[in-house]
Amino acid sequence: MRYIISFLLTSLATTATAEVPSVVTDIPPVHALVAQVMGDLGTPDLLLTKGASEHDFQLRPSQAAAIADADLVVWIGPEL
């Protein structure tokens, strides 16, 4: 019993490590907000560059792959 308790205590003392999530955003204002939230963890990918129109945007295959591989996609919604 003593060994089980000491094993449990040592296993709880280890620090948890996680990989940096892959994040994709749609427009520059959302990208800026997400970058502030992520801080030093990483930089989110941006689909639309500054000055590009959201209304006639066509997704490239590389961007579709980035969305498919992302851990999190932050976007305004289908209205945009």
Image (tube, helix red, strand yellow):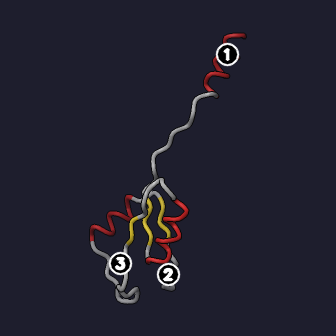
Place of residue 39 in the rendered image (x, y in percent of width and height, measured from the top left):
51, 58
Q: Nearer the viewer, mark 1 or mark 3?
A: 3
Q: Which residue is mark 2?
A: 78
* SS assignment at label 3: loop
Query: Is the N terminus in the top left, top right, bottom left or bottom right quadrant?
Result: top right
CA gap, disc 1 and disc 3 = 54 Å
Tag shown at residue 6: 1
* Residue 9 relative to residue 75: left or right: right
Q: Nearer the viewer, mark 2 or mark 1?
A: 1
Quadrant of residue 51 in the image? bottom left
CB within 8 Å, label 1 to label 3: no
Place of residue 50 in the rendered image (x, y in percent of width and height, measured from the top left):
37, 81
Tag shown at residue 49: 3
* SS assignment at label 1: helix
Residue 42 vertical position relative to residue 10 in the rendered view, above or below: below
* Residue 48 relative to residue 35: left or right: left
Q: Who comes first in sequence, dot 2 or dot 1? A: 1
